[in-house]
Image (cartoon, rainbow, N blue to C red):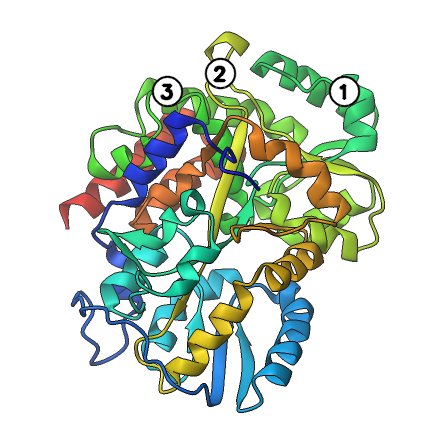
Amino acid sequence: MNKNTFGQPLSRRTALQLLGVGGAGAALTACAGPGSTAGATSAASAPATGKPTGAISFAHWRAEDKDVFAKLITAFQSATPDVTVRQDISPSNDYQSSALQRIRGGSVGDVFTAFRGAQFVDMVKAGVYSDMSKQAVVQQYEPSLITAGQQDGTQYGFPYQVVFNMPVTNEDIIGKATGGTPPKDWQSFLDLCDKLKSQGLVPIAWPGGDPGNAGQLFNSMVMNNAPSDDMCAKIESGEYKCTDDWFLTTLKQYQQLKPYFQPNSTGTAVEPCQQIFATKKAAMLATGSYHIAAIRALGATFPMNVISPITTSADKAKYEGIYNATFILGVNTHSQHQAAALAWLEFLSQPANAGEYANGTSQHVTVKGVEYTNPDLKALAPWLQKKTLLAPRFQFNNLDIRSAVEGACIAVVGGKSPDAAAADAQRVVDQQRSQ
């Protein structure tokens, strides 16, 4: 990965602006336990140093990465015999809703992770992230890819993964249907879907019953429709509304996609979607590259890539796709074994170990000097140089607002009119903003 990775000036500057926003939403209160001090911000301190000792917990949501992390833990414990590491893994939705409450107690998550956006903001505000700004480990990372772990000039954590939050493709099917040239505008994308459907395939497997994964398509659907790159931040601030023309256009386009999703798409979880994609019954899986390893585990042997629907005419498209820097590693300020926690984080940050993680999980990483040998990572490597937008759905710091806005898209696919869905979503936005 070189310094030009994701180097488009507009998206990079915008990312810095968007990631610098502060303020937590209602989620912080929701996560706070009885007697806690939700809303209070503790001054972050650097992690304690000294000889690494003790049994530490590594809290994250990536169950599919458990085996790869287990191998890394074995190697780490061999090199650091006075430390043991236990993985505490929660499903992503549970982790999103309850991780802060568990981590702030200090018994779980000596080293922990956070989603970019609202959860990271909440965790910084709760004071669980140590200040890593002056730690030598900072130098192990690509500076432009760890801004998601910063706030107000302080480096609290390190986004570990670089993923592409847009539909994964079966290239045997898509390549044949497109002749190797992906659709460059909305009508061409619909034509592709129609062609795939006429072949008896599900054009797009979309987990509308799993909001966390269903919302990944939202990124591509708004990236070129919105009047600015900080569209979600502006919905939350009240500058934009769900009833604006650009968002109504997006909802109408979701309506157009409905015939190309699998039956009962709004009630489908992500696992059945992975299954029909892995068994070649669907041409696209509308989640992201972070699911490629899971699809391989289901037995898929076909070549895969990613594709982003271009919702405008070709000449009006600003971006080709979506990426995200997430899985933000940090050392818990409440940990009783901070030296051991820091040693584990430093171990993960070494290029050889980050490479083992990347190649073992089919996810690019933010660590410098990593050699990618995984064929899927090599296939997706050209996307590292394309004009991509930092996933906008993570601009929302209020998860209730995000749920309402993304829920409008699901509601439209479920049969509600775009106007009604937009009005319902805006009502929630207004209620949240008035609190």
The residue lying toward the viewer, choosing from 164 and 330, is 330
Q: Residue at x 61, y 50 (%)?
A: 290
Q: In this figure, which residue is indicated by the disc labeled 3?
A: 246
Quadrant showing the N terminus? top right
Q: Is residue 23 above or below residue 108?
A: above
Q: In this figure, which residue is indicated by the disc labeled 1?
A: 180
**Quadrant of the rendered image containing residue 383:** top right
- Give the mark, 3 or 2, whose residue is nearer the N terminus: 3
**Quadrant of the rendered image containing residue 192:** top right
Total count of labels? 3
**Residue 109 seen in the current view:** no
**Quadrant of the rendered image containing residue 310:** top right
> Mark 2 is on which residue type?
Ala
> Mark 1 is on which residue type?
Gly
* Res. 117 mark: none
Residue 54 percent coordinates (x, y): 47, 91
Label 2 residue SS: loop
